[in-house]
Amino acid sequence: MTTSTFFLAILVLSAAAYTLGLKRAMAVAKPAGGLSRLHSRPAHYATLTALWCALPALAVFSLWLALEPVVVKALVVADLPEELSRLSTGRLNLVYNDIKNLVAGNFLGTAADPALAAAAAHYRQLKTISQAALAVLVLTGALAGTVVVHRKIKPTLRARNQVETIFRVILFLCSSIAVFTTVAIVLSVLFEAIRFFQSVSPGEFFFGLKWSPQLAIRADQVGSSGAFGAIPVFLGTVLISAIAMTVAAPTGLLAAIYLSEYAGPRLRAVAKPLMEILAGIPTVVYGFFAALTVAPLIRSGGSLLGLEASSESALAAGLVMGIMIIPFVSSLSDDVLNAVPQSLRDGSYGLGATQSETIRQVLIPAALPGIVGGLLLGVSRAIGETMIVVMAAGLAANLTVNPLQAVTTVTVQIVTLLVGDQEFDSPKTLAAFALGLVLFVATLILNIIALYIVRKYREQYE
Amino acid sequence: MSDPRSSQDQSNRPRTIDLVNAGLARRYRAERRFRLYGLSAISASLLVLALLLGSIVASGYSAFQQTFIRLDIVLDADQLRTNNLRQANYQGLVKQSLSTLFPAAVGRSEKRELYALVSSGAGFQIRDLVFASPELIGKSVPVWVPADDDVDMLVKGHLKVDEKAESHRLTTAQLGWIEQLRDQGRLSKQFNSAFFTNGDSREPETAGIRGAFTGSLFTVVVTLLLSFPVGVAAAVYLEEFAPRNRWTDLIEVNINNLAAVPSIVYGLLGLAVFLNFFGLPRSAPLVGGLVLALMTLPTLIIAGRAALQSVPPSIREAALGVGASKMQTVLHHVLPLALPGILTGAIIGMARALGESAPLLMIGMVAFIVDVPGGFNDPATVLPVQIYLWADSPERAFVERTSAAILVLLAFLIMMNGAAVLLRKKFERRW
């Protein structure tokens, strides 16, 4: 029973249960003296029946999904010949994979071992049994639930309350997914990062000055020292983010001020959607733009001025990233500026200040916490931005603050370490998770501070 | 008044109005300067937008056309029948017709240069032709076959002939043949339908976006199916039912934080949880959709809550007043009124998911996949990742294809955002 057929079957069964429940509710209502004698609307009885049809089946199915592979594996392994079943766990897993490949029809190259072939047959047989058992169990669960509720339907059954309780539980679970996601992120990154720090000391990682994650496969290999000092990576991230914010902060803020304080309705009607287009462009497009248009411009501009610019300069990535963040900063600043009460402006004008004096000396100081919060969110986006730097910044972990040289960032390193073949026992792969942990914690701290500031600020004027 | 010095002081001291007037010109200049800063900030951003779109259109529009060469292919019955029809040497037929066209090319390397004028995918085109109409066997048919990407670039003017021969990949002999082909009317630019119907390829002239587009479609469908119901349910719970307690606060803090977590972190989550822990297949739209659903969920919940908040309390009070339960009030009255707003948020969230690529790199949707995916578990890639892959390719012809793929992606994003705006305009209610 595949997942899609399962869901289709559940859908059909629940629909049938719904009609049955509806009919039953009508039937019990008639002798009692009409629908008004029922505690709930007939639809509630029907929904209750449908829910009790679907929920047990769903429970059985998810339990089966979780347990079936484990049980089947245990049974197959228990049936393996003596010399195979006594192998270490790692070897046993390999053998088990071979068996599964055999079942899937992926020929292994050499003629299959008869013991393995037998095991494969056993596996196939177990799978068939399991499929049949699952189908029977799901059907039984669905039918049992339906029958039980169907028989319980009578005018005094508080169907509405029960249905609503179930709905509330479902709504609650859906909203809790946010918490589970955070927990899952923390756990998934943390576990691999801890494994990384078992082979590379945190001191070396956080304070080392050399980043070269290629590990030597042979002992005599050249140039694969495997150094995990992340300072050059952090510095590159900070450099590119700083360039991005130097572009985005003034431009975004000034654009927001002009749009909200000076611009006439016609300019605003045109400029605002255009800025939103800037915000909606996928980052991969910005990356392409940076690599294809901006980087050569900087390179030729640099050589005109007699400066040596690398073809993957930090400047190109930073500039384009800044452009990407402009609409973000400007829309947040716009919100914040609009939240400043009109009375502050009027007071300033009343004292004879010009509009720009009002903005600079009254509006911006009053909105400063909110603006700072927005800028911090911008910084958090800059250090987490991936595609622009992957496409336009380099891989070389240079320890430099020269914006014309190539630097690398945390996100670039995560991508390079994790795209392609991965071995989850080598520090090279695990280093990506350590970097991911740093990235997550850094952005988390920035976000919490920023959101706190923005909220405090809003409360101040509300 | 009794102090004469003070009155003298007063007469000597300039009046306030003079002070103000003296400073006015400077202050007005400052005012104008400030306005100019603001205006230049806006014009700079819009200029960059124009430059970005302009550069992509300029380098991408030519990819919608492809250079074709007309060859007279002799579908020699003997040569086709000797093998079975499926495995016959169709590329050989193409080469043969090129040789008859330019009998002067005899040497081994010269012949190789000659054959390199035509795409290596031309053979498949002949095969498809033979399969579609077997009655052509034994005849000589004129066929337009795609030219090689270097020829294509030359015809489109992206390569300059007067450059030194080493700077591009065409030899002098090849340039001469191209000139002859052009004179004979055998060279023409036609609509590049392969770009929309083919999967990925190492050869620019046969590479298309259909595979990536289908992958995007599957991924976004999974994202929508998962994130929309869950997002609406979560928004309804938080806005209408949630008691104010620690758990609710925790949920809210988490949602706000998750909305600002870098997308690549979701990729790490997908890799560690969905691939390594649950053992779901790599490169599958199913996993991509799951990851993107988790990523868009916070945005959707925030948009949904805003939409629910905008429904006035009088609606709820009226429903409760005529005896509806809390759940009935929400499901029958509040939710339908908030639905346009929620849908707008959902469309914008889906547009975001459609353009996202970083988390998908982590879960292996970055592989070179030629086949068009047929289901949610098939290996696939998505449009933005295809753009990333092509942008990395060295061939000049991939630059214009990358730009063209970007144009297609942007067209879809603009369509989705336009739909969101329309929806908002049509159904938005001002209470």
Image (cartoon, coloured by chain):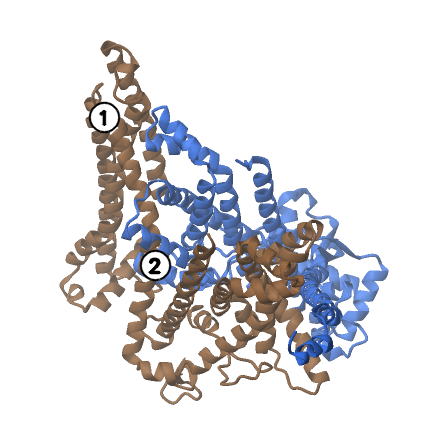
Chain colours: A brown, B blue
Q: Is residue A185 left or right of residue A271?
A: left
Q: Is residue A296 visible?
A: yes
Q: In the figure, residue A444 lies in which quadrant? A: bottom left
Q: Is circle 1 on the same chain as circle 2?
A: yes
Q: In the rendered view, tell whether residue B329 sits above or below residue A451.
A: above
Q: Residue at x 39, y 28 (%)?
A: B319
- Nearer to us in this view, B56 or A421: B56
Residue type at numbered disc 2: Thr
Q: Residue at x 52, y 55 (%)?
A: B382
Residue type at numbered disc 1: Arg
- Nearer to us in this view, A227 or B422: B422
Secondary structure beneath label 1 = loop
Find disc 1 in the rendering and name its residue: A158
Q: Is residue A299 visible?
A: no
Q: Residue A293 appears at what percent x and percent y?
A: 67, 70
Find disc 2 in the rendering and name its residue: A182
User: Label 1, label 2: how many angstroms apart (C-alpha)?
Assistant: 38 Å
Protein chain holding label 1: A
Q: In the figure, residue B13 lies in which quadrant? A: bottom right
Q: Residue B209 appears at what percent x and percent y?
A: 59, 54
Q: How many marks?
A: 2
Residue placed farthest to the right in the image?
Answer: B183
